Image (spheres, rainbow, N blue to C red):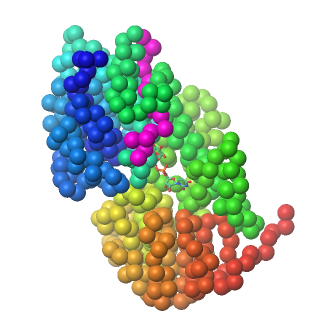
Amino acid sequence: MDSLTVMKVCCIGAGYVGGPTCAVMALKCPDIQVTVVDRSSERIAQWNSDKLPIYEPGLDDVVKKCRNVNLFFSTDIETAIKEADLIFISVNTPTKNFGNGKGRAADLKYVESAARMIAEIAQSNKIVVEKSTVPVRAAESIMHILHANQRPGIRYDILSNPEFLAEGTAIEDLVHADRVLIGGEETPEGHKAVEKLSWIYEHWIPKKNILTTNTWSSELSKLAANAFLAQRISSINSLSAVCEATGADVSEVARAVGLDSRIGAKFLQASVGFGGSCFQKDILNLVYICEGLNLPEVAAYWQQVIDMNEYQKSRFSQKIIESLFNTVSDKRISIFGFAFKKNTGDTRETPAITVCKTLLEEGAKLDIYDPKVEPEQIIDDLTHPCVTESPESVKKAVQIHSDPYSAVRGTHAIVLCTEWDEFVTLDYKRIYQSMMKPAYIFDGRKILDHERLQQIGFHVQTIGKRYQRTGLNRSWGSVPQL
Ligand SMILES: NC(=O)C1=CN([C@@H]2O[C@H](COP(=O)(O)OP(=O)(O)OC[C@H]3O[C@@H](n4cnc5c(N)ncnc54)[C@H](O)[C@@H]3O)[C@@H](O)[C@H]2O)C=CC1
Ligand SMILES: O=C(O)[C@H]1O[C@H](OP(=O)(O)OP(=O)(O)OC[C@H]2O[C@@H](n3ccc(=O)[nH]c3=O)[C@H](O)[C@@H]2O)[C@H](O)[C@@H](O)[C@@H]1O
């Protein structure tokens, strides 16, 4: 593969996937030049600055090592496409919010615009790699667009190479990927293209962990992996409701179930609900595809994973209101954590939005603290048109804090929405003293030491475990007759 030793790679889309993926690729492949392009000049400027546009542990170091060596961030899409041998399409594929498939289908307009740009600009053969998560057979649409606009003599090979990284652990996930999946056409040319992409990953991923399949299997495997992961969370969350009604403890149930090696222990952490930009979007997309294939039973099966997640978010929010004597009107409530999980500043589909929105609608005043989410982002999320309160009333009712102790002063309750490590080690005696009494804690992530909090005087409520309302005595309420 001598001719490949000066390979040039371009990635369209400098987001949560494009940025970290290319940074690790550049780190592991000094013989490859990687250029990440985006039409957002603001995002590119941030990638070229000291404050990267996303927070991801370990990312700063990797970018610092490679940037302007063999890793470049640029808005010059044209040059990057022209020079590249291989182009990743890593643009967003959000749920459609209009027209056919509204609220379910993936909106492929950004993928399509990337394909059109490639067709317009390319003057030599290109391997085009679908890195974005897309519906099954999306590669066919990309191929159509490229072929319909093809300059004579240019060859395109389309590959599917879905990304499995999780935010907050992206660098670790990329460096030690469980597997890399590459789907390609089952033709000699298709195999050659797969080999070229595989060669890049072989710089750091053992060859046995690089899986090659046909394109459609690869596309569907990505949706399937996210659906399975989300399904586990909805399953354990559904049981958390049973635990609260019976006196069982969901952590004990998860442990007992997870020790079965056929089931495994991961992704069984009951919570306020899953968030993030992809689980809901990808399952909705799967549901939409199944409906289109006239498979209504399959569609309904996966839809239930989303419905259970909605139920969990609203169940937790209602529990807060009920515990606070059925009214939160004019009460101040501290929100600990706004990101959809720890170690990221990303708030897309974060359960905190549902919780805050419900409390705001009930007239509460919120004091919000998150170590990594920008205040403007929180206000943006809470004044989004889908939140029923007017932007003015939201801004009046919400205060953002840069330190957790100031966020709890004079509040009635703490609602923990994100499992940031720092919340575990806060001085809860000090916090208790500065709060209104009775002081409540609603632990939506099950990370705090509830016994100790009760000893301090807090009334504790959590997911999947029932504490007596009066708090100090840790004992179960009455168990319903079975
Ligand atoms: N966020 C995550 O953890 C993961 C996301 N994915 C998938 O990867 C894809 C990208 O996701 P994110 O990186 O989170 O999205 P993102 O929204 O963070 O980044 C996408 C970027 O693409 C740019 N873009 C859109 N159209 C463009 C065009 N025509 N030309 C140039 N730039 C363009 C946007 O300006 C944006 O900066 C999605 O399909 C997602 O489902 C897959 C695995 C993990
Ligand atoms: O396609 C994607 O975007 C990615 O989606 C998820 O990654 P991500 O959403 O970044 O983070 P996860 O760790 O999966 O967490 C998702 C949500 O589920 C919640 N969760 C996770 C695990 C668990 O046991 N319980 C639970 O409530 C998290 O708090 C978070 O809100 C998948 O884990 C990745 O493999 C995939 O590439």
Residue 458 image-quadrant placement: bottom right
Instruction: Decide: is 311 above or below 332.
Output: above
Query: Was residue 183 drawn as part of the magenta stretch in this picture?
Result: yes
Asked if one can make out residue 42 in the rendered structure from this viewpoint, the answer is no
Query: Of all residues shown, which one is farthest toward the right?
Result: 482
Q: Nearer the viewer, residue 298 or 29?
A: 29
Q: Residue at x 17, y 39 (%)?
A: 69
Instruction: Decide: is 96 above or below 191.
Output: below
Instruction: Decide: is 164 above or below 400.
Output: above
Q: Which residues are the magenta region?
A: 172-187
Judge from the rendering whether residue 463 lies leftward or rightward of residue 434; answer left or right: right
**Residue 133: image location, x then y, percent:** 42, 36
Judge from the rendering whether residue 24 lies leftward or rightward of residue 151; answer left or right: right
Asked if one can make out residue 351 in the rendered structure from this viewpoint, the answer is yes
Query: Was residue 142 drawn as part of the magenta stretch in this picture?
Result: no
Number of callouts: 0
**Residue 206: image location, x then y, percent:** 44, 31
Q: Residue at x 14, y 30 (%)?
A: 79
Which quarter of the figure is the C terminus placed in? bottom right
Q: Nearer the viewer, residue 65 or 71?
A: 65
**Residue 424: image location, x then y, percent:** 49, 71
**Residue 190: image location, x then y, percent:** 39, 15
Q: Residue at x 54, y 84 (%)?
A: 439
Which quarter of the figure is the N terminus placed in? top left
Instruction: Decide: is 352 above or below 429.
Output: above
Judge from the rendering whether residue 367 lies leftward or rightward of residue 120; answer left or right: right
Q: Residue at x 30, y 22 (%)?
A: 127
Q: Nearer the viewer, residue 426 or 437?
A: 426
